[in-house]
Amino acid sequence: MTPKQILDSFSDTLMQDERILSAQERALLANLLQHAKSAGGESRETQEAVRRVIASAVGEAVAQRAFGVLGGSIVERILEGTGSATNSVGVMKDQPQPPRGTPLREPDPPSKHPHPPGLPMRGTPPTPAPAPDQPQPPRGSTERTAVAENRVAVLERPSHLPARCVVLDEFLAPQEVEELTRFTLAHEGDFYASEVVSPVADGGVVNYEHRRSRVLMDLERHQEVMLERIKAVLPQVLEKLDMKEFSIADVEAQITASSDGDFFHFHSDNGSDRVAARHLTFVYFFQREPNRFEGGELRIHDARLEGDCYVTEGSYRTIVPRQNQIVFFPCELMHEITPVKCASQLFADSRFTLNGWLRQ
């Protein structure tokens, strides 16, 4: 039985679970299917094709949510239903994986609200959160980052993740860089504290021991400009990274401002079920010139699987932030941002990135 058949066989049952699809979502789905069925002027074959596409997409979405709600037990149900244990290990290989209760995971897509309640602005920096001098794991360290898994998919995870990336210089036109910088400085008041995902909260939480910076989610036209440039070079980037071409299902993008003492500990970008569809990370550097900060290096680590988590092997590739430069790397790679030193502590002198993820 194929993965597609397995997903479809469970869709009807799982769609009745309110933990997976709400009543409003089920009503919306019913309306979509009804409109597809009654669409005037279309042949019966076209209507059925549309219905199949909708059903397939819903089946995959249901399976993704089911993993987050039911965990590994969903795998056992699938195997019982298909009666095919001999080839089951690889069947769910590409599906999202449930968390194991680790204390921190990679960042979840932040809220679209510019000022979530309780999140401090940079004008009132938190006093109990001084950044550590060396957030990067030392050679031989067993410091762990949270990587979600289940007992079937863990067999498919590589034992070694070598650091690799593609760096492109002069990525945007000078006028585009200037406009992006002006836009960023003009929206200082719309930035809010970066978040990480915690298993004890429904959404992201601010944790200054793991990550410290500020983000802006509404990039207006600058997101489309960046995406257009990325699509133009994507085939060559994927070839250099030894990755297969893929259809972009969605794009997440944000501008991140890192000022004095800001950093981001060792982590990956797609290790939880909510962000498992992230496939390729991009980080575009820009700043006011001349540069008024130090540090803020992007370090992509060689990592090995130790128990349930990836740990650094002590070696890494270092990318020093440079104006109008972009870096691409697979989302599963372990990386960190070293502490930023900015003597003026002015927002305008921050380390800025337009960073994000292509989802498949």
Image (spheres, grey):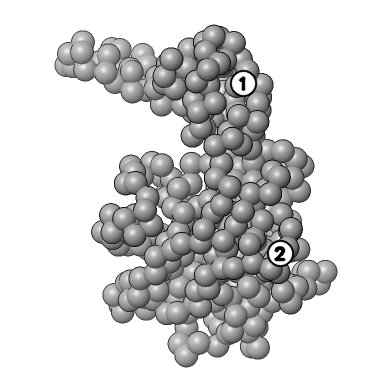
Tell me if residue 94 comes above or below residue 216 in the rendering.
Answer: above
Q: Quadrant of residue 130?
A: bottom right
| Residue in the picture at 59% in, 68% down | 315
Residue drawn at x 39%, y 69% as measured from the top left: 167
Q: Quickly name the residue at label 2.
A: 140
Report helix, strand or loop for mark 1.
helix
360, above or below 121, in the image:
above
Residue depicted at 50% across the width and 87% down the height: 291
Please identify, in this view, whether the residue under mark 2 or under mark 1 is nearer the observer.
Answer: 2
Q: Nearer the viewer, residue 220 or 226?
A: 226
Position of residue 23 in the picture relative to residue 133 (left or right):
left
Local secondary structure at mark 2 = loop
Residue 104 % position (x, y): 71, 50
Position of residue 192 measured from the top left corner of the image (x, y, whole percent): 62, 62
First of labels 2, 1 by sequence position? 1
Say left or right for 288 vs 39.
Answer: right
Choose between 34 and 150: the one closer to the eye: 150
Residue nearest the observer in this picture, 175 or 152: 152
Q: Which mark is residue 74?
A: 1
- Badge 1 crowding class, 10 Å Cα cut-off, few under 14, some 14 to 19, many 20 or more, is some
Q: Quadrant of the N terminus?
A: top left
